[in-house]
């Protein structure tokens, strides 16, 4: 009696053998030694990554691209005998000795360009796939597991999440070239006291209130309370070579984003915003550089916790 297997059957069999191999290696390693990986991190708010723990390994599942990262403790048997580099799973030996965000010459290279060709040491780090500031900040736990630094990651996230960051802010998008959308936008703008303009521009330093009015096709602005009150904001205050720090620093410091929003909505006049600038008052961007950093770059950044006012 003859039998045959389709490519799908063979692929399914190989996947099962792969999982069985991982299980056997983990069981053999666990039977001889139990490697402590430090404190365990749990995903509380983020939606796009998940973590699982074994005796001598960890697995991170990236929900955006479906990739999994098998992180193997360096003093386990698996470390020298197990290596995966496929479109679905990659393995890393941890804790990492070093890592990079701009080169592939390190044991791990974290990137947000998940749609580009990647080497075996690439790991997709995409906090901006999340909807809210607090969810983005929790991606520090994603990085922490690569360094066995869960305790530190939990501490930092606990500090910023304890600042009562509001996750209820919603965004609405309008196509101003569509007359119905334009009318709806103008009607809404007539009812609000504060506006945060998120329009993309390649030259944030040249974006002013006049630019905003041109974008929404408005000549007479006398009916807008937010302009009378001088409360028109953008989140492009900190830039480096026209790249916004909003996509970097603001991810790890959601409590400062919250403080900026509070000042924008309930102005006190005695707080200097970090990421938001008021273009209704002609506030310019701040060009940041290495000369503005007053700490050793090899030392981890502590979250800025503002005092209650």
Image (cartoon, rainbow, N blue to C red):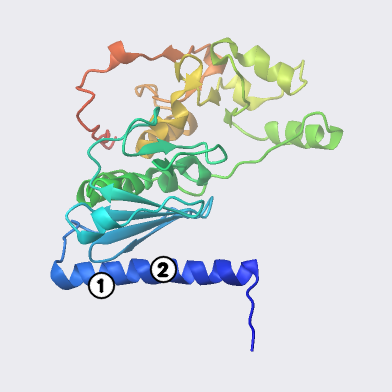
Q: Farthest bottom residue?
A: 1
Q: Which residue is mark 1?
A: 27
Q: Nearer the viewer, residue 280 or 296?
A: 296
Could you tell me which residue is drawn at 28 percent across and 67 percent down?
A: 25
Could you tell me which residue is drawn at 47 percent across and 42 percent down?
A: 126
Question: 122 left or right of 212?
Answer: left
Q: SS class of the residue under badge 2?
A: helix
Q: Nearer the viewer, residue 235 or 109?
A: 109
Where residue 212 sits, quadrant-wise, is top right
Position of 104 relative to 221 (above/below):
below
Q: Farthest front residue?
A: 1
Could you tell me which residue is drawn at 47 percent across and 25 percent down?
A: 276
Binning the other alpha carbons within 10 Å of mark 1 as few (below 14), some (14 to 19) or many (20 upward) gives: some
Q: SS class of the residue under badge 1?
A: helix
* Quarter containing the C terminus: top left
Report, in whole angstroms, how far the alpha carbon at label 1 lies from the one at label 2.
12 Å
Could you tell me which residue is drawn at 16 percent across and 55 percent down?
A: 75
- The answer to which of marks 1 and 2 sits earlier in the sequence is 2
Where's residue 33, x and y in %? Answer: 14, 66
Where's residue 30, x and y in %? Answer: 20, 69
Binning the other alpha carbons within 10 Å of mark 2 as few (below 14), some (14 to 19) or many (20 upward) gives: few
Q: Nearer the viewer, residue 86 or 280?
A: 86
Where's residue 70, x and y in %? Answer: 36, 56
Where's residue 142, x and y in %? Answer: 35, 48
Is residue 265 shown to the viewer in this render?
yes
Question: 167 left or right of 70?
Answer: right
Question: 158 left or right of 102?
Answer: left
Q: Which residue is mark 2?
A: 19
């Amino acid at each position: 009696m003859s039998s045959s297997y389709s490519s799908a059957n063979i692929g399914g069999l190989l996947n099962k053998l792969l999982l069985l191999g991982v299980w056997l290696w983990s069981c053999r390693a666990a039977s001889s030694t139990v490697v402590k990986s430090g404190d365990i991190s749990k995903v509380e708010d983020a939606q796009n990554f998940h973590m699982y723990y074994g005796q001598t390994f960890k697995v991170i599942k990236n929900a955006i691209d479906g990739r999994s990262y098998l992180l193997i403790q360096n003093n386990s048997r698996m470390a020298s005998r197990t290596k995966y580099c496929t479109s679905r799973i990659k393995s890393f030996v941890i804790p990492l000795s070093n890592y990079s965000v701009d080169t592939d010459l390190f044991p791990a290279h974290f990137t947000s360009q998940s749609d580009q060709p990647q080497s075996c040491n690439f790991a997709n780090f995409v906090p901006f796939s999340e909807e809210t500031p607090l969810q983005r900040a929790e991606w520090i736990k994603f990085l922490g597991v690569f360094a066995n630094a869960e305790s530190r990651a939990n501490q930092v996230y606990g500090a910023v999440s304890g600042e009562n960051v509001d996750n209820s802010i919603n965004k609405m998008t309008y196509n101003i070239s569509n007359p119905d959308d334009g009318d709806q936008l103008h009607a809404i703008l007539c009812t609000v006291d504060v506006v945060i303009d998120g329009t993309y521009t390649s030259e944030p330093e040249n974006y002013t209130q006049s630019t905003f009015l041109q974008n929404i096709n408005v000549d007479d602005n006398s009916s807008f309370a937010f302009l009378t009150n001088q409360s028109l904001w953008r989140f492009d205050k900190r830039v480096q070579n026209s790249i916004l720090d909003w996509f970097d620093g603001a991810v790890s410091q959601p409590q400062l984003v919250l403080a900026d929003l509070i000042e924008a909505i309930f102005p006190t006049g005695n707080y200097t915003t970090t990421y938001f600038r008021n273009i209704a008052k002609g506030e310019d961007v701040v060009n940041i550089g290495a000369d503005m950093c007053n700490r050793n770059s090899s030392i981890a950044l502590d979250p800025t916790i503002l005092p209650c006012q």
